[in-house]
Image (tube, coloured by chain):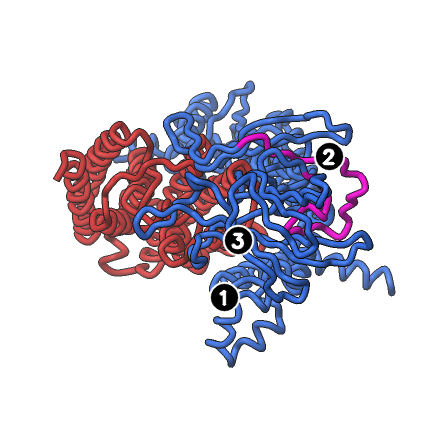
């Protein structure tokens, strides 16, 4: 096991500990535990950045190729988004009970995947790769935080009295949580749009076609449309409350599926990016 | 009556409900389309799927799901979405104009107008002076992420009028994108053209092996040709093997070179509306027909593709006819090139000792002769003429796309992203506050419009301001 992989295992362990601390913190109304969980998440993030940094230096390219790298980059962005948001607004730490389990599961899955580095092929040798993948990761990070906020919203909405109501009383007001969910959906929607646009431009540069209804392209569009419907429901039809939160909760796994599920399930030119090291 | 019906139709087409349903239909349709093989009814994958799903296949075929993204239903939905987007963009433009006007008025509002008209009053600790109330209110709002400015006795946090234009710009750009896509598809052409090294082909339908051209494509205005100057099967640059790489030239109608470059992935040749990309490659055999007097009467370049199934590793892309002076086909000639082997593996490329298998048949496919010949050698045809193999070389199958809408699409994408960024990032808010002195003490009078992207909610602002401005009183009583 290389030093780089050891660091990643340490990061995964910290994330798992943070998940447990968030769960205990919220369940037993211990603010201190939630603060510690946030600190542990940040620590895990530092180890993950270090591991990916070493890998980047070794391979000469960022985390773009294969399930291990792609899932890693998605987790990195999701946790980074969450840590920054919760650091700025500590009352949102409770959203960690939704965001961190996703990070642990995804990174855990990545640790089981082949970790051998893949070289950049002629089709990927473009600066568009960095831009395209970076916005995909940023979009997922934003969607993951919106997912966390929406889950926190639903839990509290269903706990208007009793122990859980008391435990969750330190969360921001429900309308603030809802606004945050919408804002992160908006940010993710923008980043996802940039990801699609840069992908189309890159496809035209690389293959002479800007759109070919490849399964990944199609599912990227589906996810974007799914979130576009969310935004129309929120801003035009004035939906709010629990049903809007449920929509955001359902949407995030769809985005995750588009990013890492589709390359595994379908034979696409993107296969090497998200798949288990399929040839490009 | 007609006007009323028209208004109702416009209202329906511009309704959010219809837009949402259309988005849902397009989304679900696309989702289903990824699960069903796409292509013509004769495509292998489609026929295999059809025989495996005999129950659903008639429905799938009837609604056009095998060609989901060019089907009538999908096209109608996208067109309806375009109309919806246009009406929605128009509504958003009007709303943005109204909001921009409100923002401009709010930017020049004064204490007197706010005192006369406000939508929120918060009672303050009587011990606080007007200046202290405004100072505490400013700090509280700042804490909630709303940066205020002090203008005499007025606190203001008013967004710039351009902040409300993001959504309208985004929707207009989306509409422009849809229009550019439609018009581009009507006029564009996209095809595969096999060009051997040294060969020049006119950019005309006859030169393409496979061609998709829009119904409004006008070939009479295209006066150019495409030439392959060289071919490197293992081109390396920047430390990366770029794969088989042709050097391609585009020539104008007079034969003058417009542009020449190597083309490989991420390095397409672009000139004007033309994009050229190397889709595939193979071998080529140049044949000459020499008459009994030794005079060359015809020359043809035959393209040969690599094939795992073929015993010699290649298959002819097509055949050439040998005709009499009246144009009647006498013989049909096809060529393949036996490849070198490395163990069981066929080596793609020109063999060390190049040779071609020349197969001559009658027009009704009866064998006449077949022989392996090396460059310079020939086979004698029944007519006495000789079919000579001149050279064996490479050919590049070029993907040639002529689409002038691409720069427009790029521009539309950039404008859409700018509009969306403004819609996502720019705050659309008006917060005005001043102090009203009365017999019951000071009150904070405020007006709030938190349209979009506000850092806080109205209820939170009210609560926080209420707590902050009564804190001193609470402190003094405890």
Disc 2 to disc 1, C-alpha distance? 37 Å
Q: Tell which residue pokes out farthest to the bottom in this image.
A: B55
Crowding at dot 1, Cα within 10 Å, few <14 / some 14-19 / many 20+, comes out as some
Q: Which chain is red?
A: A
Answer with the quarter of the image where residue B463 lies.
top left
Asked whether B219 falls inside the magenta stretch, the response is yes
Crowding at dot 3, Cα within 10 Å, few <14 / some 14-19 / many 20+, comes out as few
Counting from the top left corner in percent of width and height, residue A266 is at 41, 57
> Considering only vertical position in the picture, is A252 above or below B76?
above
Asked if the residue under mark 3 is in contact with the one under mark 1, i.e. CB atoms within 8 Å, the reply is no
Q: Image check: B171 left or right of B283?
A: right
**Range shown magenta:** B201-230
| Chain B representation colour | blue
Q: Write down the residue under mark 1.
A: B45
Residue B458 in view: no
Residue in front for this viewpoint, A166 or B206:
B206
1 vs 3, front mark: 3
Q: Write down the residue under mark 2.
A: B224
Answer with the quarter of the image where residue B65 lies.
bottom right
Q: Tell which residue pokes out farthest to the left in this image.
A: A1
Q: Which mark is residue B431?
A: none
Chain to which the residue tagged by mark 2 belongs: B
- Residue lying at 47% horizontally and 41% vertically, measured from the top left: B354
């Amino acid at each position: 096991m290389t030093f780089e992989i050891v660091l990643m295992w340490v990061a995964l362990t910290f994330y798992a500990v943070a998940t447990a601390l968030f769960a205990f913190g919220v369940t037993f109304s211990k603010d201190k535990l939630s603060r510690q969980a946030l600190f542990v998440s940040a620590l895990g993030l530092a180890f993950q950045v270090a591991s990916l940094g070493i890998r980047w230096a070794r391979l000469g390219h960022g985390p773009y190729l294969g399930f291990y790298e792609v899932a890693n980059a998605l987790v990195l962005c999701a946790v980074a988004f969450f840590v920054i948001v919760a650091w700025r607004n500590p009352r949102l730490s409770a959203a960690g009970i939704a965001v961190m389990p996703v990070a642990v599961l995804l990174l855990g899955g990545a640790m089981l995947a082949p970790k051998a580095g893949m070289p950049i092929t002629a089709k990927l040798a473009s600066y568009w790769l960095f831009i395209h993948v970076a916005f995909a990761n940023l979009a997922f990070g934003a969607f993951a935080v919106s997912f966390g906020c929406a889950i926190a919203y639903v839990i509290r909405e269903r706990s208007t009295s009793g122990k859980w109501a008391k435990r969750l009383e330190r969360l921001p007001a429900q309308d603030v949580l809802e606004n945050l969910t919408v804002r992160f959906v908006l940010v993710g929607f923008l980043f996802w749009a940039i990801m699609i646009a840069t992908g189309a431009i890159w496809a035209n540069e690389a293959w002479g076609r800007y759109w070919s209804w490849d399964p990944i392209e199609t599912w990227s569009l589906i996810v974007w449309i799914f979130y576009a419907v969310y935004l129309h429901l929120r801003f035009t039809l004035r939906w709010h409350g629990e049903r809007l939160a449920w929509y955001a909760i359902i949407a995030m796994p769809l985005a995750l599926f588009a990013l890492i599920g589709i390359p595994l399930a379908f034979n696409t030119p993107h296969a090497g990016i998200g798949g288990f090291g399929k040839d490009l | 009556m007609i006007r009323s019906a028209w208004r109702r139709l416009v209202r329906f087409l511009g309704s959010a409900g219809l837009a949402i349903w259309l988005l849902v239909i397009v989304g679900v349709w696309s989702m289903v389309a990824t699960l069903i093989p796409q292509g013509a009814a004769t495509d292998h994958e489609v026929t295999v799927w059809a025989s495996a799903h005999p129950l659903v296949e008639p429905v799938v075929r009837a609604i056009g799901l095998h060609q989901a993204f060019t089907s009538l239903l999908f096209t109608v939905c996208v067109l309806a979405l375009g109309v919806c987007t246009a009406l929605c963009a128009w509504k958003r433009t009007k709303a943005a104009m109204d909001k921009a006007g409100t923002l401009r008025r709010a930017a020049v509002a004064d204490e007197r107008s706010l005192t006369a008209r406000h939508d929120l009053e918060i009672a303050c600790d009587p011990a606080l002076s007007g200046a202290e109330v405004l100072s505490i209110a400013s700090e509280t709002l700042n804490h909630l992420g709303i940066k205020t400015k002090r203008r005499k006795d007025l606190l203001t946090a008013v967004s710039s009028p351009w902040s409300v234009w993001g959504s309208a710009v985004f929707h207009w750009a989306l509409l422009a994108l849809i229009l550019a896509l439609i018009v581009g598809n009507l006029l564009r052409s996209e095809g595969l053209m096999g060009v051997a090294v040294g060969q020049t082909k006119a950019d005309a339908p006859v030169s393409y092996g496979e061609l998709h051209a829009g119904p409004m494509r006008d070939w009479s205005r295209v006066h150019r040709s495409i030439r392959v100057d060289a071919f490197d099967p293992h081109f390396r640059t920047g430390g990366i093997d770029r794969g088989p790489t042709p050097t391609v030239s585009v020539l104008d109608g007079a034969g003058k070179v417009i542009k020449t470059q190597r083309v490989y992935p991420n390095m397409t040749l672009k000139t004007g509306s033309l994009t050229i990309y190397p889709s595939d490659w193979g071998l080529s055999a140049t044949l000459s027909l020499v008459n009994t007097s030794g005079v060359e009467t015809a020359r043809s370049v035959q393209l040969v593709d690599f094939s795992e199934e073929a015993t010699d590793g290649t298959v002819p892309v097509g055949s050439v006819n040998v005709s009499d002076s009246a144009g009647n086909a006498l013989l049909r000639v096809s060529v393949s090139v036996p490849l070198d082997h490395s163990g069981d593996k066929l080596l793609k490329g020109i063999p060390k000792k190049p040779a071609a298998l020349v197969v001559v048949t009658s027009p009704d496919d009866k064998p006449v002769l077949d022989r392996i010949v090396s460059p310079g050698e020939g086979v004698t045809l029944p007519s006495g003429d000789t079919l000579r193999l001149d050279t064996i070389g490479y050919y590049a199958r070029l993907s040639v796309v002529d689409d002038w809408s691409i720069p427009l699409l790029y521009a539309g994408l950039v404008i859409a992203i700018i509009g969306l960024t403004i819609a996502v990032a720019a705050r659309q808010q008006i917060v005005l506050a001043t102090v009203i002195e009365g017999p019951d003490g000071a009150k904070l009078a405020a007006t709030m419009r938190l349209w979009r992207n506000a850092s806080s909610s109205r209820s939170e602002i009210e609560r926080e301001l209420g707590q902050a401005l009564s804190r001193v009183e609470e402190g003094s009583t405890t």
